[in-house]
Amino acid sequence: MKKSKVMPLMFSALMIAAMLIFPREASEGGRNALIMCARSIVPTLFPFMVFGNLLTICGGAEIFGRVSGKLMKGLFGLSGKCALPLFVGFVTGYPVGAASTAELVKRGEISIDEGERLLAFCNNAGPMFVTGAVAGMLGCDRRGGMILWLAQILSAIVVGIIISPGARKQNAGFTRGKTSDMPAAECMVVAIKTAVQSILNVCGFIIIFAVIISVIEETGALRAVQGIMHTNENVASCVLSGILETASGCARAAKIPLPMWLSMPLISLILGWSGVSVHLQVASVISGSGMKLTRYFIGKILQTIIAPVVTFILMKIIPTFAAVSVTVTQTDIFIKIFVWMICACAIVCANLLLVFSVILRSRRRGGR
């Protein structure tokens, strides 16, 4: 048996055993996730996926490249065609930005190096998810949701500037590629089919991770996390869920009794990290493109740190909420979550990179 398959086999066996022991909790977690997908994820994300795919298929990269070529090169050292994945990543949500990047790399319209640098900051939470689902969980209006979304955009741009300082001096002129010559009707059909597959992947990951989180919480692992963090169940559940899956993490973060001045940066931190669920989706959509995930994970760690800071600043600039006094206990809870999330994210990134490298080596050996 290959070493790369030992861990998945062990984890699968443990999860099957846990679901047999806790069938009600597992089904309840899956049911709640399915309801959330039906009410929030599919209606808000699917239409954007369709039209984002349509832009890519119909040669939108060429148009975006002509309009924003100088800006992309000046800010990020990337060719103008990279503006399309960045745009759809901002307005559609993950993993569409990553999928669009992978498509351009596969079609030869941007280089692998450009794709890897773009991947570090183009995959973000979409406006409909943030202003609709997340704002609803938090109990704030659409203006609060817009602050959260704008914080993701600005923090991603900062990450893009940081991630490749030397590249801006190079000639980012890799623009070879072939625009699709499919009829308009066929382009629409392909865009819808691709979006259906993408939304099923997104919902599938959300449901399975919701089941995993529910089962983990029942096995006593959550109490172990509480003991390590020296905190209560809500905080431990928020950290655990936020690491694994964005929607569940935001839902649990919203239940922590914190004022909006701390809740919003906390939510922004979870959105910036995106969750292991999204990282696995990204690994899936870029498969076969030749891109590695090292820069992607560096970008996500940076965004996890930068996004809450940007949210604080935006809440000062845009006084949507009345400033309230924050107690020492509330501040301590926020700092504790922030520190533990950053540490856990770094550990998860290192382990995921190790797993993906083992899988990649196994595939290469199998192809020889």
Image: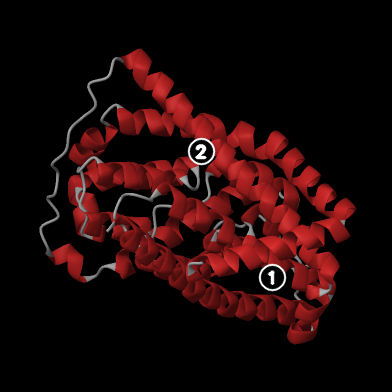
What secondary structure is found at the residue carrying circle 1? helix
Q: Quadrant of residue 121?
A: bottom left
Q: Please identify, in this view, whether the residue under mark 2 or under mark 1 is nearer the observer.
A: 2
Q: Which residue is mark 1?
A: 239
Q: Residues within 10 Å of mark 2 (few under 14, many from 20)?
A: many
Q: Quadrant of residue 202?
A: top right
What secondary structure is found at the residue carrying circle 2? helix
Residue type, numbered disc 2: Ser
Residue at horizontal 54%, vertical 54%?
A: 278
Picture coordinates of residue 23, whole percent (x, y): 86, 53
Does residue 313 appear left or right of residue 237 in this picture? Answer: left
Marks 2/1: CA–CA distance = 27 Å
Q: Quadrant of residue 85?
A: top left
Looking at the image, residue 312 lies above or below residue 291: below
Picture coordinates of residue 208, whole percent (x, y): 68, 51
Q: Which residue is mark 2?
A: 198
